[in-house]
Amino acid sequence: MSEVTIDTLLSKAKNKFLLANAIAGRAKQIVDGSLPYVDDFNPANPVITALKEIAADKIKIKIL
């Protein structure tokens, strides 16, 4: 998966706010040392890695 579109990402979340919070939270986990769930990750950019994980359905977005 080389390119992630906003339409793909918005289909995984209810709205943009939830999507942004999920991406930020997962990016922080990656910075803190969590291993990425995708093979084609960028170690210098955890936000892009989080985007790729959500687009690949490796991360589910739930409302608690």
Image (cartoon, rainbow, N blue to C red):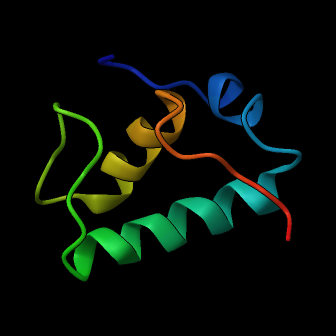
Position of 3 compared to 61: left or right? left
At horizontal 39% and vertical 67% (from top left) the residue drawn is 27
The image position of residue 8, as x and y in percent, is 64, 23
Q: Quadrant of the C terminus?
A: bottom right
Position of 18 compared to 45: left or right? right
Residue occupying the far front of the picture: 64
Position of 15 compared to 38: left or right? right
Q: Quadrant of the N terminus?
A: top left
- Vertical arrangement, residue 30 with respect to residue 59, above or below: below
At horizontal 18% and vertical 41% (from top left) the residue drawn is 41
At horizontal 70% and vertical 54% (from top left) the residue drawn is 19
At horizontal 38% and vertical 20% (from top left) the residue drawn is 3
Q: Which of 25/45 is in front?
A: 25
The image position of residue 38, as x and y in percent, is 26, 36
Residue occupying the far bottom of the picture: 32
Position of 7 compared to 43: left or right? right
Residue 53 quadrant:
top left
